[in-house]
Amino acid sequence: DIVMTQSPESLAVSLGERATINCRSSQSVLYSSNNKNKLAWYQQKPGQPPKLLIYWASTRESGVPDRFSGSESGTDFTLTISSLQAEDVAVYYCQQYYSTPYTFGQGTKLEIK
Amino acid sequence: EVQLVESGGGLVQPGGSLRLSCAASGFTFSSHWMHWVRQAPGKGLVWVSRIDTDGRTTNYADSVKGRFTISRDNAKNTMYLQMNSLRAEDTAVYYCVGSEFYLGKWGQGTLVTVSS
């Protein structure tokens, strides 16, 4: 199984500041057909289902604000929120969809400082 | 509007069975692989199972293999999860998810509680 390791477990950032969440996969999740990584990011607010933010490691889902961005370097992935808003308080998960069992990171709880 | 509506959750005793359903609308159900993802209270997300577009290919997490069966009826735009030999550790909210590679479409979830 591919292990997804997320850091930090929790993060407190001031409004308007940058938030950065990291994720590392235990092996490559590069899809040879399009040379893109099969890595997604989800946002989950309390009492709600997860919401897809980013797929193919850096493609923003339709309707997701452009303050959210994804980047990659080999098996290291990063979700960045450029200017934190109050509504961004949530738990964020990375996930690989390269092979079954699909696996998630353990989650990063993002709060306002 | 895309909608995935789960039903069938509830309280069941250890060793019992439940059948979850997921009714889809607002997208071409028959063109999407479908998944079940679960989340135990206060815990993270865990992928459970997936089924291909015509129901011929299925995959399961090791923790449910041999106990859970995923299926779909494209004529009814509905997916199912038959859960047998339930254990306390199966207690979770079960989400129905539609995918185009990534897990793009999520239902609201249905709670399954396994307890005596």
Image: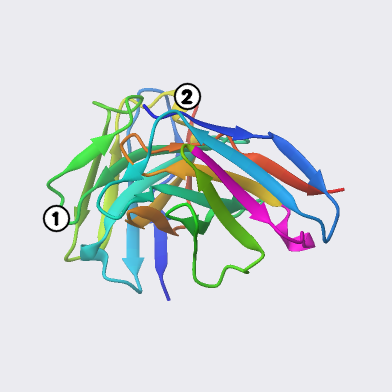
- Crowdedness near tag 1: few (<14), some (14–19) or many (≥20) residues, C-alpha within 10 Å: some
Q: Tell me the tag on residue B88.
A: 2
Q: Which residues are magenta?
A: A76-89
Instruction: Please say if B98 is above or below B75.
Output: above
Q: Chain of mark 1?
A: B
Q: Position of residue B67 (x, y in %)?
A: 27, 28
Residue in view at x 39 percent, y 52 percent: B96
Q: Is residue A11 visible?
A: yes
Q: Which residue is mark 1?
A: B54
Residue in view at x 65 percent, y 53 percent: A80
Q: Earlier in the sequence, mark 1 or mark 2?
A: 1
Q: Is residue B19 visible?
A: no
Position of residue B116 in the picture relative to residue B32 (left or right): right
Q: Quadrant of the N terminus of chain A?
A: top left
Q: Magenta segment: does it hold A82? A: yes
Do callouts 1 and 2 point to residues on the same chain?
Answer: yes
